[in-house]
Image: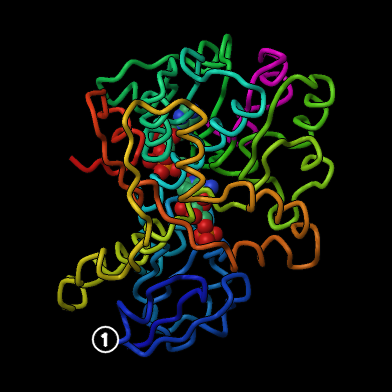
Amino acid sequence: MRILADENMPYVEALFAEHAQITTKAGRAINADDLVDIDVLLVRSVTQVNRTLIAKANKLKYVGSATIGMDHVDQQALAERDIRFSNAPGCNAVGVGQWVAQVLLTLADKSDEVLKGKKLAVIGAGNTGTAAAKCLQALGCDVRLCDPFKAASGDPRDFVSLDEALDDADIVTCHVPLTKDGEYPTHYLLDRQRLESLKPNVWILNACRGAVIDNRALIDWAKANPQARIALDVWEGEPNPMPELADLVEIATPHIAGYSLEGKARGSYMLYQWLAPQLTWPAPNSLASLLPNPNQAPITCSAAPSQSQLLSWCERVYDLDLDDRLFRQKAFETGGFDGLRKNHQPRREFSALTLVPKGKFEVNWLEQFGFSVGR
Ligand SMILES: NC(=O)c1ccc[n+]([C@@H]2O[C@H](COP(=O)([O-])OP(=O)(O)OC[C@H]3O[C@@H](n4cnc5c(N)ncnc54)[C@H](O)[C@@H]3O)[C@@H](O)[C@H]2O)c1
Ligand SMILES: O=C(O)[C@H](O)[C@H](O)COP(=O)(O)O
């Protein structure tokens, strides 16, 4: 049994080495010749899995992507060759939700604003949108969900239309897959016209796929609306984002919103869980056994934290500012964007930090936000 895996997929050795011979390669460089005699291909979002890639794949039976997004995989082409496919739905949703929360706390801190009560439009209420909504509801934001598919499927939550969501939003955060077909395509969902409909001082976040927002239109709109605030993790044309756009963006990161150690480990782990029964491999060890100890000293708190204190706790776990600084230094060098992703700082989820309350105050919201609470 031979596995070819993206070299940026952690824990592949730990999970699969007992059952297969493993070769790894940079995801963008994997080509048709590499797939000769390969039984299982494990990719991340940067490998285009299409007819050209699988043309010489004489033994390929399984393709797994350790990601939520699937826009890089031609599933029809795989099905025609009887090659089974799975992604890792939800694997890095917590990381994305926490990126959104920390971005908003950071923006609010810079301008001394309170997030509580702000109208937050979450576009796409699946795994990552729901994770973001959970964190921001914990902070008292007025969260509105827009997801026509969930609304039609009988999801009991309240939903609004896209126009209603955008109309009076103080903050818009995007969490949809990149799609070009169907009733509600998302390519350029925020186009020139929709951008024009937003409040001039709106905050816009994108942590799904770059082309969900027309980046050229965003540049023009941002110049015309200097009070607006923009934070982007994903960019049209990755790995070559538009430098002009980066200059207009207050927080810029290189497609790492979901890059917590837990999220990456979950992606690989979920692919093992998918393959194991099909290949009669044993159940995997626990996910926790793969992860290093977070080494975060618990924090004792005697009262509910202020917004800025909460941000300082987030920063103990994840240095968002470092990601933004490195992006501005390196993202436009040759290979810079991918290099930032490959060498990304080890980042844990907020649950790595335990809060120990002393005294009587409400702590459930801190748990909902993502921290561990010792009782
Ligand atoms: N930046 C990152 O690191 C990162 C990490 C994970 C996922 N992603 C991206 O985010 C996307 C969303 O991830 P997810 O886990 O939430 O996926 P998901 O499938 O759980 O949820 C996506 C939701 O979007 C909804 N949707 C689709 N079209 C829509 C439209 N036109 N308007 C409103 N809602 C619409 C779907 O009904 C679904 O509920 C992924 O497809 C991936 O592209 C990025
Ligand atoms: O779709 C996803 O899950 C994310 O966009 C994913 O984290 C992207 O990271 P990559 O696979 O490119 O390492």
Q: Which quadrant: the C terminus?
A: top left
**Mark 1 closeness class: few <14, some 14–19, many ≥20 residues within 10 Å:** some
The question of residue 189 being in magenta is answered with yes
Q: Amino acid at mark 1?
A: His
Closer to the camera, 192 or 338? 338
Residue hosting label 1: 19
Which residue is pictured at 84% across the width and 42% down the height?
244
Which residue is pictured at 47% across the width and 68% down the height?
43
Question: On the rendered structure, is 336 left or right of 167?
Answer: right
Helix, strand or loop at label 1? It is: loop
Which residue is pictured at 46% across the width and 16% down the height?
116
The question of residue 196 being in magenta is answered with yes
Q: Can you tell which quarter of the image residue 21 is in?
A: bottom left
Which residue is pictured at 80% across the width and 32% down the height?
219
Work out whether residue 183 can be spotted: no
Image position, residue 160 (x, y; %): 43, 14
Closer to the camera, 308 or 144? 308
Q: Is residue 125 above or below residue 90?
A: above
Image position, residue 78 (x, y; %): 42, 64
Closer to the camera, 11 or 77? 11
Q: Can you tell which quarter of the image residue 362 is in?
A: top left
Work out whether residue 17 can be spotted: yes
Image position, residue 214 (x, y; %): 71, 34
Segment colored magenta: 185-205
